[in-house]
Image (cartoon, rainbow, N blue to C red):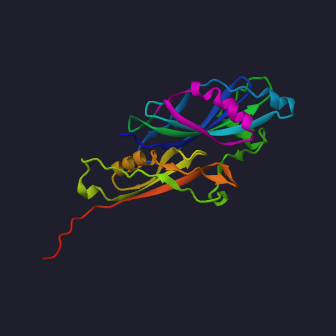
């Protein structure tokens, strides 16, 4: 059964030929967690056509979904200053490699938010963590990213599921542990597909969360729209598990 994502944040700063990383980490689950790392990067190339039109810097933020071996199983752009930067990242990100995350010594699935900063100058950027923070706070990168994910309030209609799969609990879960509440956060992309599910809350046995996760990834929604145009949106789904009780008719 597929495990659940633990969310962490990673910022990557990209020049035309070099990349340096600044990492912070926070987990949604209890226990000792060691975050995933980027172990091999092919740098995206600054779009030449942008510099010819007077655009010399920009950025894009992507979500990356890793399995328990550190292999990327999905990614999506959630914001960008220009669509051209998303295209530049899409050409190289499949070649990136990651070291897996660990929880209590075992490999776990992991979700990363990665912000990639572009500069048009053809120079290497040797920036360590402290310098990266100072550069960001001092406004080295001025452009503000435009969200590629709509707000609920901007949607033409609320997301409508067109295909729903109910969670299936494994038979080895005792009856007294089949009650609880699970909340899964996820994206609905422009085609209505569920992307990047993450455990937000689990009141009860963790196997309830596994069942909810396995179910939600199979859901399909009507494509979300903003003023008639398809758009991704953040969403969450609550699963309430109850114990069925057999009732006998009164004699």
How many numbered discs sit on the rendered protein?
Answer: 0
Q: Is residue 175 magenta?
A: no
Residue 142 versus residue 162: which sits nearer the camera?
A: 162
Give residue 234's position: percent from left, percent from top.
58, 51
* Residue 30 seen anywhere in this rendered image of the structure: no
Report the quarter where the C terminus lies.
bottom left
Residue that appears at 24% across and 56% down:
175
- Indicate the quadrant where residue 180 lies: bottom left
List the single residue furthest toward the left.
251
Q: Is residue 177 left or right of residue 13?
A: left
Residue that appears at 26% across and 50% down:
173
Residue 123 versus residue 189: which sits nearer the camera?
A: 189
Report the quarter where the N terminus lies.
top left
Give residue 221's position: percent from left, percent from top.
53, 51
- Indicate the quadrant where residue 104 lies: top left
Residue that appears at 76% across and 37% down:
58
Query: In the image, which residues are magenta?
Result: 71-100
Residue that appears at 32% across and 61% down:
242
Q: Is residue 182 left or right of residue 117?
A: left
List the single residue furthest toward the bottom.
251
Residue 46 versus residue 155: which sits nearer the camera?
A: 155
Give residue 114's position: percent from left, percent from top.
61, 38
* Residue 136 seen anywhere in this rendered image of the structure: yes
Q: Is residue 73 magenta?
A: yes
Residue 125 versus residue 241: which sits nearer the camera?
A: 241
In the image, residue 44 above or below residue 224: above
In the image, residue 74 above or below residue 123: below
Give residue 235's position: percent from left, percent from top.
55, 53
């Amino acid at each position: 059964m597929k495990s659940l994502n633990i969310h962490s944040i990673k910022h990557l700063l990209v020049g035309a030929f070099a990349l340096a990383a600044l990492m912070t980490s926070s987990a949604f689950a209890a226990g000792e967690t060691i975050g995933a790392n980027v172990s091999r990067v092919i740098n995206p190339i600054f779009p030449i056509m942008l510099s010819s039109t007077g655009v010399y810097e920009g950025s894009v933020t992507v979500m990356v979904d890793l399995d328990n071996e550190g292999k990327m199983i999905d990614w999506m752009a959630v914001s960008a200053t220009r669509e051209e930067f998303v295209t530049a990242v899409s050409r190289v990100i499949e070649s990136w490699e990651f070291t897996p995350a660990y929880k209590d010594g075992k490999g776990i699935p992991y979700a990363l938010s990665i912000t990639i900063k572009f500069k048009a100058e053809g120079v290497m950027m040797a920036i360590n963590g402290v310098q990266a923070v100072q550069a960001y706070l001092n406004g080295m990168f001025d452009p503000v990213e435009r969200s590629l994910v709509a707000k609920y309030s901007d949607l033409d209609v609320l997301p409508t599921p067109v295909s729903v799969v109910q969670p299936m609990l494994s038979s080895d879960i005792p009856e007294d542990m089949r009650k609880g509440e699970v909340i899964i956060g996820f994206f609905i992309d422009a085609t209505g597909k569920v992307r990047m599910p993450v455990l937000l809350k689990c009141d009860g046995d963790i196997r309830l969360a596994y069942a909810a996760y396995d179910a939600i990834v199979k859901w399909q929604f009507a494509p979300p729209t903003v003023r008639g145009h398809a758009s991704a949106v953040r969403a969450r789904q609550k699963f309430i598990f109850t114990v069925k009780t057999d009732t006998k008719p009164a004699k």
